[in-house]
Image (tube, rainbow, N blue to C red):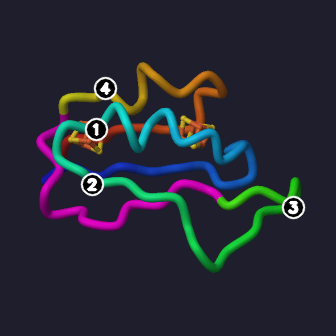
Amino acid sequence: MIHVSIDERVCKGCGLCVRACPKNVLALSKTKLNAKGYHPAEVAVPEACIGCASCARTCPDVAIGIVKE
Ligand code: SF4
Ligand code: SF4
């Protein structure tokens, strides 16, 4: 089981992780705004994640963590 966590407080909604994911797991929230006023990334299709960590490596703000259980 792979768990992707996104620290929404840190996220600046740049979308780099969304583009980096080969499985289209991530999306920018259409409804949520964080305290900085950005639409944060969220895990839209968690079951599609293969744990490649491309998203975590791409995030300039180190907002993404990958945990394999
Ligand atoms: S670990 Fe890989 S497959 Fe999973 S969300 Fe990140 S980029 Fe996508
Ligand atoms: S790359 Fe990082 S800062 Fe940019 S949208 Fe994804 S989680 Fe947020």
Residue at numbered disc 3: 35
Tags 4 and 2 in contact by the CB under 8 Å rule?
no
Residue at position x 38%, y 61% in the image: 43
Q: Which residues are magenta?
A: 40-51
> For the residue carrying disc 4, how many other residues have a C-alpha within 10 Å: few (<14), some (14-19), or many (20+)?
some
To which residue does mark 2 refer?
A: 25
How far apart are labels 4 and 2 at the CA level? 11 Å
Magenta highlight on residue 2: no
Q: Do the CB atoms of the residues marked 1 and 3 lie less than 8 Å apart?
A: no
- Which residue is under mark 1? 21
First of labels 1, 4 by sequence position:
1
Q: Position of residue 44 (x, y in %)?
A: 34, 67
Ligand 1 found in image quarter: top left
The amino acid type found where label 1 is placed reads Cys
Is the CB of mark 2 within 8 Å of ligand 1?
yes
- From mark 1 to mark 4, how far is it between C-alphas? 6 Å
Q: Amino acid at mark 3?
A: Ala
Question: What is the distance, in whole Å, between disc 1 and disc 3 at their CAs?
Answer: 25 Å
Name the kind of residue labelled 2 in the image: Val
Tell me the crowding category of disc 3: few under 14, some 14 to 19, or many 20 or more residues within 10 angstroms, Cα based.
Answer: few
Choose the circle earlier in sequence order: 2 or 3: 2
> Total marks drawn?
4
Question: Cβ of disc 1 within 8 Å of ligand 1?
Answer: yes
Q: Position of residue 29 (x, y in %)?
A: 56, 68
Residue 8 appears at what percent x and percent y?
65, 55
Asked whether the residues under the numbered discs 1 and 4 touch, taking CB atoms below 8 Å apart as contact, a structural biologist would say: yes
The picture quadrant where one finds residue 46 is bottom left
